[in-house]
Amino acid sequence: MRYDRQIKLDEVGVSGQEKLRKASVLIVGVGGLGCPAAQYLTGAGVGKIGLMDHDTISITNLHRQVLYDENDLGKPKALVAKQKLHRLNSEVELIAIEEALTKDNAEQLFNQYDLILDGTDNFETKYLINDACILAGKPWVYASIYKNEGQLSVFNYKNGPSYRCLFPKTTRQNVSCEATGVLGVVPGIFGMLQAMEALKIILGVGKELSGKLKISNLLSGSEQILNFQQRPEEIEKVKKIGIMQVRMDCEMIDSDKKYLDVREAFEQPKVTAANVIHIPLGELGHRSNEIPKQEEVLVFCQSGKRSQQAVAMLQTDFGFQNLKNVKGGIKTITNG
Ligand SMILES: Nc1ncnc2c1ncn2[C@@H]1O[C@H](COP(=O)(O)OP(=O)(O)OP(=O)(O)O)[C@@H](O)[C@H]1O
């Protein structure tokens, strides 16, 4: 009875409903994208749904994270999501995972699910999901939001193209909803589109977005679908090296600012933007005249240690007053 209205569809039927009941989906990030995706997958009767999020609910989440209400403030998202979804469909096995996805727990966790749905908001986690999916042999449904625009794709489906095939360059900058703002409807719609891709994959119907990137601007109404190819060398690299952790530095997002990179020339990742000056720590003594003195300069290295020394030295020995150390540095760590 519960599923009558979808069972009536030729694409579903009783056998499709059985497929849904036997399927399992892990939703990583139960925020603006993850909440609506979780609601529709639970409603549709997907047998097992993992809800993973290490965050707690804040008032600024409520305009778009539709599983939560004012009584939930301060509570863990994964737990509250599980409780709310259980009221919607008690036949679904719901598993709350109150942890962040990391390089250490990803692969083992992904092995327990058929499909991963990405509801996260940062590049580090998206690369992590990608690499762990390649290693565990699982497809994943991706979405990403920037202001009124969203992207949607399916990666690693039947060994198809991966996120690294589309975005091989990992030196990117995170931009959060907190920084840019977003109307709740935008992640809402994309979360639902993700649920649709997940249902198509589970049911084996329709045309899933493997090798295609859908980009829609919900303000202008424009929409495009880009085709992209597999880059076998990217996939082989992950298989050989394992999960390649990528760390972005949020302070790097501003193209209006000046940066000083005090790392050696061979250090990875290379930052080639025009507003970055490269002077290794050991050469600062005789090259300080290359650094602008009047405007603010953000100084960085790999971990934040050398840049701290550089700032101190440039201040005391050369009278710089507008330098700022980027704490934590910029890092791309491979475990290979
Ligand atoms: N590595 C991770 N493991 C598990 N959950 C993650 C991970 N990275 C991000 N998330 C979760 O993904 C969700 C993304 O939600 P959303 O983009 O709506 O933003 P938010 O972080 O909740 O809010 P805001 O950006 O406004 O502060 C968050 O709940 C966040 O905790």
Image: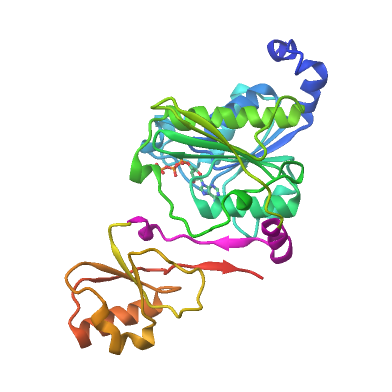
In the rendered image, residue 53, in percent from the top left (x then y), is placed at 54, 45
In the rendered image, residue 330, in percent from the top left (x then y), is placed at 44, 67
Q: Foreground residue, 4 or 200?
A: 200
Please identify the quarter of the rendering in which residue 83 is found: top right
- Which residue sits at x=29%, y=85%? 287
Q: Can residue 331 be seen in the rendering of this structure?
A: yes
Q: Residue furthest right?
A: 15
Q: How is the image coloured?
A: rainbow
- Which residue sits at x=46%, y=79%? 265
In the rendered image, residue 62, in percent from the top left (x then y), is placed at 40, 32
Q: Is residue 261 magenta?
A: no
- Which residue sits at x=42%, y=69%? 329
Q: Can residue 100 be seen in the rendering of this structure?
A: no
Side of 255 where 164 appears, left or right: right
Q: Which residues are magenta?
A: 233-254
Please identify the quarter of the rendering in which residue 317 is found: bottom left
Q: Establish if 238 lies above or below 270.
A: above
